[in-house]
Image: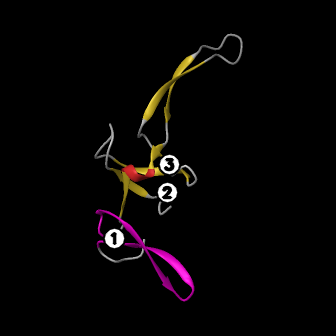
Amino acid sequence: MKLKKGDNVLVVSGKDRGKKAKILEVFPKERKVIIEGINTHKKHRKPRRQGQKGEVVEVAAPIDASNVKLVCAKCAKPTRVGYKLSAEKKFRVCKKCGEEI
């Protein structure tokens, strides 16, 4: 999977299409990512202690990695990601400007 925690991405499809945000968590086996403020659901939380009130909390749910595009830090455009090898080191490359990500 070519996306990592901390990457800035653009949502390409779904209810939050067009929004840019940061990746909080990555699940490579399921090919899903959790993005800050994207694909949120309301969850009803029970009171844990006596005297405490129950509450409604907004929780970010995972979104499929194919529905997001990485935003290049150099050219600031949504792009696909490629790889290059140099001196036995593999690093990610922006397909639009060719710079290292």
Residue 59, x across and y down, in percent:
50, 33
**Residue to which mark 3 is pinned:** 32
* Disc 3 + disc 1, Cβ < 8 Å: no
Q: Is residue 85 left or right of residue 76?
A: right
Mark 2: which secondary structure?
Answer: loop
Mark 1: which secondary structure?
Answer: loop
* Disc 2 + disc 1, Cβ < 8 Å: no
Q: Answer few, some or many: residues within 10 Å of disc 3's Cα (few below 14, many 20 plus, some between 14 and 19).
A: many
Classify the position of the C terminus by image quarter: bottom left
* Rendering quarter of residue 63: top left
Q: Amino acid at mark 1?
A: Lys
In space, the residues marked 3 and 2 are separated at their CA atoms by 14 Å
Q: Nearer the viewer, mark 3 or mark 2?
A: 3
Tell me the chief SS of the magenta region.
strand
**Residue to which mark 1 is pinned:** 74
* Rendering quarter of residue 44: top right
Residue positioned 47% across, 63% down in the render: 2
Q: Amino acid at mark 2?
A: Gly
What's the magenta region? 74-96
Residue 28, x across and y down, in percent:
56, 55
Q: Nearer the viewer, mark 3 or mark 1?
A: 3
59 vs 77: above or below:
above
Q: Answer few, some or many: residues within 10 Å of disc 1's Cα (few below 14, many 20 plus, some between 14 and 19).
A: few
In space, the residues marked 3 and 1 are separated at their CA atoms by 25 Å
Q: Amino acid at mark 3?
A: Lys
Q: Answer few, some or many: residues within 10 Å of disc 2's Cα (few below 14, many 20 plus, some between 14 and 19).
A: few
Q: Is residue 49 left or right of residue 10?
A: right
Residue 89, x across and y down, in percent:
55, 82
**Residue to which mark 2 is pinned:** 6
